Image (cartoon, rainbow, N blue to C red):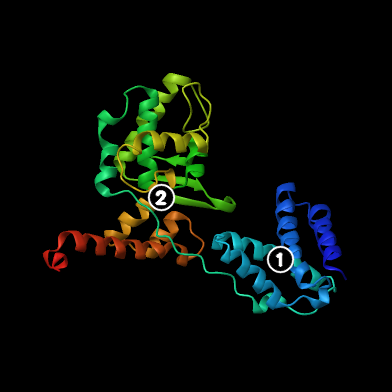
Amino acid sequence: MKIAEAIVRFVDYIAVERRMAAGTVRNYEGDLRDLQAYLLPLEVTELGDLSARDIRGWQMEHLGAGEAAGTVRRRLSSVSSWLRWLRRSGFLEADLMAKVSPPRQPKHLPVFFKESETEHLYDEGLFGSDFTGRRDALMLRMLYETGMRRSELAALREGSVDLGALTIKVLGKRNKERLVPIEIELAHNISDYIALKRQTVGETEWLFVSAKGKPVSAAMVYNIVRKYMAGLSNADRVSPHVFRHSFATHILAEGGNIQAIKELLGHENLATTEVYTHVTREHLKEEYKHAHPRSRRK
């Protein structure tokens, strides 16, 4: 079978039978057409002539052109799906991807706020005393004290909070629920906010709403974090997710259990959480370099 025909059949399969989104289909087809264009000067037009060496050469061409490792990995994922379908459909026998290693992505340590920066969240003068200011203060404190994602925060309902048990029921990825504990002061803040919310906009199902009573969006949470933290922090990036990183990093730095942090964050795998152990090690190294007199000697 011609490579061109194999691409057409695969694109038709994912568009019609798998009903993938149009944008996803375009990405798959674009990556496969790019591979086809690379193979044409090599006179590789038949599936039977395609080799792992050809795919590795295509990969190296993109890397050599300065393309990011993550982008190349995505391209290889498209090719891998195509080849897997071809083998499953009986059009190809060899597992060509078994001899192709995707490029390693550089590991970036999570960005987090310093404890001295998060302490400002408890300065009453930072936020207004009206409904919007009280709401913003609670949102930022809750992000920092629970480690939840911005989408999880925006999705909270009044019923998600159990003030008696000092817990919040969080609906995470893949609709997986977890209970996150809260301390008594935050519980009082939530209770006071709910009372003010009912006075301002009336009864609402959602915990966080606009001054008109509409539920906040994840984008709105992002903008609120930027509004306050951009001027308070020297972090390389300011976003709701930086609060999540700060939550985990600060607990771990105080001797918190890595398994407990995993459960609090709702991670599926411990390996995802273990990145914070590297963060704390690097942070300690930086503190040593800046503070210990022996580290400054030439």
Q: Along the line of sight, which residue is nearer the eye, 99 or 244?
A: 99
- The residue drawn where x is 35% and y is 40% is 141
Q: Earlier in the sequence, mark 1 or mark 2?
A: 1
Q: Is residue 228 visible?
A: yes
Q: Position of residue 215 (x, y in %)?
A: 52, 30
- Residue 79 is labelled as 1
Looking at the image, which is closer to me, 234 or 241? 234
**Farthest residue toward the left?**
293
Q: Secondary structure at mark 1?
A: helix
Q: Residue at x 68, y 75 (%)?
A: 97
Residue at the spot 40% in from the left edge and 56% down from the top edge: 110
The part of the image, by quadrant, that contains residue 248 is: bottom left
**Considering only vertical position in the picture, is 24 above or below 238?**
below
Image quarter hosting the C terminus = bottom left
Q: Is residue 166 visible in this depiction of the protein?
A: no
Q: Nearer the viewer, residue 65 or 253?
A: 65
Residue 244 circle label: 2
Q: How many marks?
A: 2
Name above or below for residue 213 compared with residue 72. Answer: above
The CA distance from mark 1 to mark 2 is: 35 Å
- The image quadrant where one finds the N terminus is bottom right
Which residue corresponds to the image point at 82% horizontal and 67% vertical from the top-left?
3
Q: Secondary structure at mark 2?
A: helix
**Residue 73 location, x and y as percent?**
60, 64
